[in-house]
């Protein structure tokens, strides 16, 4: 049965999947706390949602500031009477080739994809456990499943998030707190707009948001989109390292 949420917090809400999910849940009666760094973009999103009859509260927040993120989310949790849903969506992807490694790119991804996502999820976890209800969601990636060429930092950061979520899920199996890991493939967004390489099964943002939203309300444990990647990811995960190394060279 699909779950309904009274209060939700979503990071990375100024563009792409995060923006779309914020509007998607707000249209369905959820009060959404939409978090991001760009105040003007959040204000535009609030106005759009309000005109459609939804409820959205802009929250200017930088998830790379871990303790500040935790403090702010806990404040919101207390003030709204309890967050039912928290979606750690904020993320960035930058090139990190082993042949031309740039530490600044790696560090940025660790700060956003690792520190930011962990702080977002951990902030309200104690309160959810105490209430014995709530849903934690992380937007990982198909890149979490294997190391891809020139994407060491991104793949590692998304693999971290997927494993963190899995550990939370098994710890919480006998509670009513649910945990979901979402693994999108290529989705049209600001992050993918500059990609110079082919992007198989590229999804429109609205289509991706619709599928992710439906997966969240079904409280799935793990979900890969689009469907074309599901069988491929199962096969790729089982490939011997030598076979994957050879296949990855062709991907270059």
Image (cartoon, rainbow, N blue to C red):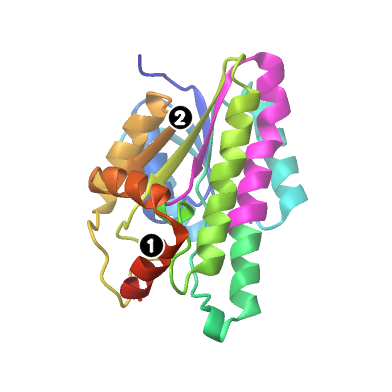
Q: Is residue 211 above or below residue 20?
A: above
Residue bearing the label numbered 1 = 243
Q: Is residue 94 magenta?
A: no
The structure residue drawn at horizontal position 58% and vertical position 28%, both measured from the top left corner, is: 169
Q: Which residues are magenta?
A: 113-141
Q: Overall secondary structure of the magenta stretch?
A: helix
Locate the C terminus by quadrant. Answer: bottom left
Which residue is found at the position 24% from the left and 53% from the top? Answer: 203
Quickly name the residue at label 2. 221
Q: Is residue 235 left or right of residue 166?
A: left
Does the rendering let one see residue 237? Answer: yes
Could you tell me which secondary element the residue under label 2 belongs to?
loop
Q: Position of residue 208 (x, y in %)?
A: 29, 46
Residue under the image location 61 percent in, 71 percent down? 106
Mark 1 lies on a secondary structure that is helix
Dot 1 or dot 2, earlier in sequence? 2
Horizontal side of 180 relative to 205 (left or right) equals right
Residue farthest toward the bottom in the current orientation of the protein: 100
How far is mark 1 from mark 2, CA to CA? 29 Å
């Amino acid at each position: 049965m699909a779950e309904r949420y009274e209060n939700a917090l979503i990071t990375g809400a100024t563009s792409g999947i995060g923006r779309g999910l914020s509007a998607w849940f707000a249209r369905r009666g959820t009060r959404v706390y939409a978090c991001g760094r760009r105040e003007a973009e959040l204000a535009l999103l609030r106005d759009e949602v309000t005109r459609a009859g939804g409820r959205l509260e802009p929250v200017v927040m930088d998830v790379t500031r871990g303790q500040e993120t935790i403090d702010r989310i806990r404040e919101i949790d207390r003030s709204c009477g309890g967050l039912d849903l928290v979606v750690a969506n904020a993320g960035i992807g930058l090139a990190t080739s082993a042949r031309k490694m740039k530490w600044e790119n790696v560090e940025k991804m660790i700060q956003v994809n690792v520190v930011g996502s962990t702080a977002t999820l951990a902030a309200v976890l104690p309160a959810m456990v105490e209430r014995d209800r709530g849903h934690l969601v992380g937007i990982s990636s198909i890149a979490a499943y294997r190391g891809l060429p020139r994407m060491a930092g991104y793949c590692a950061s998304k693999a971290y998030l997927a494993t963190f979520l899995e550990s939370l899920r098994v710890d919480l199996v006998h509670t009513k707190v649910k945990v979901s890991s979402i693994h999108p493939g290529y989705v049209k967004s600001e992050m993918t707009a500059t990609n110079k390489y082919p992007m198989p099964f590229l999804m429109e943002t609205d289509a991706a948001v619709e599928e992710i939203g439906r997966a969240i309300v079904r409280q799935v444990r793990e979900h890969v989109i689009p469907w074309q990647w599901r069988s491929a990811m199962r096969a790729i995960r089982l490939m011997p390292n030598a076979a994957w190394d050879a296949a990855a060279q062709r991907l270059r």
